[in-house]
Amino acid sequence: MMDRLDTEIAETPVSGREAPEQATSAAPSRKVFVKTYGCQMNVYDSERMSDALSRDGYTATDSPEDADLVLINTCHIREKAAEKVYSQLGRLAKLKKRRQSEGSDFMVAVAGCVAQAEGQEITRRAPVVDVVIGPQTYHRLPDALAKARTGAKVVETDFPVEDKFTALPKAPEKVIRKRGVSAFLTVQEGCDKFCTFCVVPYTRGAETSRPVDAIVAEAERLAAAGVREVTLLGQNVNAWHGEGSDGREWGLGELLRRLAEIDGLERLRYTTSHPRDMDDGLIEAHRDLPELMPYLHLPVQAGSDRILKAMNRRHTADDYIRLVERIRQANPDLALSGDFIVGFPGETDEDFEDTMRLIETVGYAQAFSFKYSPRPGTPGADLGGHVDEAVKSERLDRLQALLYRQQRDFAERCVGREIDLLLEKPGREPGQLIGRSPWLQPVIVNAKPEEIGDIVKVRITKAGTNSLFADRV
């Protein structure tokens, strides 16, 4: 499912500072530079690969020039994503040639969804690459690198039977602390919805849910290391299900209730969701749990029933609007976010106006919108009636102007409100810290560095272009 989880972050570098510092005593000392593209789950995956590499003697560097290994964790959602990867690999080929001339054992690995989709093609087109590893096999990365050091080109893109999460090492407490007071935690992977525009079922596989005990244990480790906020991740996170401690089948709502019991965890979020999997238990969690932040990313993609059917979304515009009404009845303070695709094959002017009417009806605090671009191997790529690029651009401009106005209106309504703010990181100016509002907006306030991790009462004083400003109360 290509919803916010796989579209929000166009390019996010995961610096070496986030990798474990300590190698095992028996392993040689090597340095790794990790570059991450794409979604929050890719950020989480990069952290877990860094944990696995620590066993292989790797420590962190913020520069590829200093690295013994460059690991690129890729995303296949954006248009021409694969070509961007090949372009970067071309630059790395020059670096590898120079480093090898200096006697360095320099290696390049490609992970993530482009790796899964392209497989052997990557090593054919970019001989600089030593290892290609998919998102379901990255727990094998140290073994793959060991094979590559013998001169082999290693491609690991199958969907293994073993549980990668069980095979991965646990991050040490001091590594978790360095990563910050907010953390991601993958609870679900894959998607069975097969939206016709989306590559996720082919690159991430079928829906799978991690067991309750494993999720709780990881959340407890995070809390013990000082994490105050956890965001649960999944390609279709609200499809998560598992056997609870009471022997019943739990949904995401019950899991959130269990995680809310963990000492030290003050805030819970989750992303990304499908409207068909918003069940009563999850809606009631938004009503009952103060730890569950009043923010929901619930992609609809289009407001035309004809286009929704062509997308294989399995809901109508009215289904979506009625669902939003139920959720807002449960929690009137909830802010809604969404995803929109304009110019899907066959979209007419009237179809587009249906989408605009849905946006006006629902009202969004945030949203992410894109022009449709075909993904090889998806049913949408073979549909007729592709929309002219100029028409797509005009529609996207109109749609984004409406969404931006709604976002600004929501931010302005926050001015004057008092909120509890989790202080997360330094701001751009001395004496400033940045946190996130309950509705996920960045909030800038004057505070001391030693207060990072504290939850403080603030009053919103101003709404900027992309951030809120606040004073301590």
Image: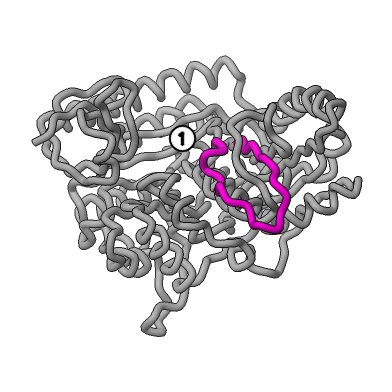
Residue 95 horizontal/vertical position (percent): 77, 25
Reading the image, the residue beneath label 1 is: 340
In the rendered image, residue 25 lying in the magenta stretch gets the answer yes
Residue in the image at 82% along x and 42% along y:
130
Task: Please identify the quarter of the rendering in which residue 268 is found.
Answer: bottom left
Residue 162 position, x and y percent, is 68, 69
Note whether residue 312 is visible. no
As drawn, the residue found furthest toward the front would be: 25
Quadrant of the image containing the C terminus: top left
Q: Residue pushed farthest right?
A: 151
Q: Nearer the viewer, residue 18 or 210?
A: 18
Amino acid on which the number 1 mark rests in the picture: Phe
On screen, residue 42 above or below 246: above
* Residue at x 35%, y 53% (from the top left corner): 227
Residue 288 in percent (x, y) is at 21, 62
In the image, residue 403 above or below residue 44: above
Q: Is 234 left, or right, of 430 in this rendering?
A: right
Going 29% across and 53% down the picture, which residue do you hit?
Answer: 267
Q: Is residue 2 above or below residue 206?
A: above
Say whether residue 129 is left or right of residue 260.
right
The magenta stretch is: 15-35
